[in-house]
Image (cartoon, grey):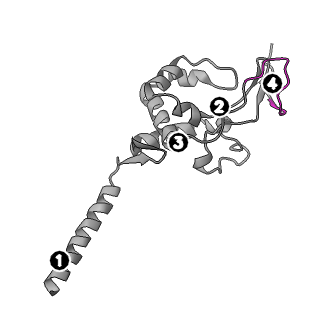
Amino acid sequence: MKSNLTNIILISFIFLGLFFWNEAQSDTTKPLNVKPGFYFKMKIVEKGRSLVKTFECNDCHTAGYLQSKGNMPEDQWLTGESLGWRGPLGTTYGANLRLLIDSLTEAEWVEKSKVLATRPPMPHVILNAMSNEDLQAIYQFIRYLGPSGKPAPAYVPPGQEPIRPPATIPKPPK
């Protein structure tokens, strides 16, 4: 009887150890809660997170991010911005990248990013110049966050008034 209890405890410790060892692996895969069967390599997701931070994507694509000095929960990142940026080319808004990514495959995102030409203040030339590997990492990170929020307001052409007062981009010097 005592031997059976010892064996049960020993087997329990072995399974518990295997569980924690498996969770501690550096490149584990984790399922996306909203899309069962979609798994992520966490090293790639971490690289994408780092790139999103480095290239300051949240500044324009996350409502309130600048005002909070970056102190914003990750589950609110990249859900779009309703504050417009007005310049000589009209008023633009930071798109909801989480909804955009949800509508694209990784290959479509990479292809789109390589030829993207947008209005200011979006620095599309940075995306155009990125390696496929970096673009894939950004895709995986945003995909990992999952779809959230609603689409950002549509572009407002020059001479038309946006619904909310926008921030103004100064005209370039002549």
Precedes in sequence: disc 1 or disc 2? 1
Residue 49 point in image, percent of width and height: 51, 42
- Disc 2, SS: loop
Residue at the (63%, 25%) spot, across then down: 123
Q: Which residue is mark 4?
A: 170
Q: Which residue is mark 3?
A: 146
For residue 157: magenta? yes
Q: Earlier in the sequence, mark 1 or mark 3?
A: 1
Q: CA distance from mark 2 to mark 4?
A: 21 Å
Q: Residues within 10 Å of mark 4 (few under 14, many from 20)?
A: few
For residue 154, which quarter of the picture?
top right
Give the residue number, with chain letter if any, for mark 2.
95
- Most extreme residue toward the top is 174
Mark 2: amino acid: Ala
Dominant secondary structure (helix, strand or loop) of the stretch shown in magenta: loop
> What residue occupies the far bottom of the structure in this picture?
2
Q: Which mark is drawn over residue 29?
A: none
Dot 3 crowding, Cα within 10 Å, few <14, some 14–19, many 20+: some
Q: CA distance from mark 1 to mark 3?
A: 44 Å
Q: CA distance from mark 4 to mark 3?
A: 35 Å
Position in image of residue 133 (x %, y %) = 42, 29
What's the mark number on residue 7?
1
Badge 4 amino acid? Pro
Q: Which segment is the magenta one?
A: 155-167
Q: Earlier in the sequence, mark 4 or mark 3?
A: 3
- The mark closer to the camera, 2 or 4, is 2
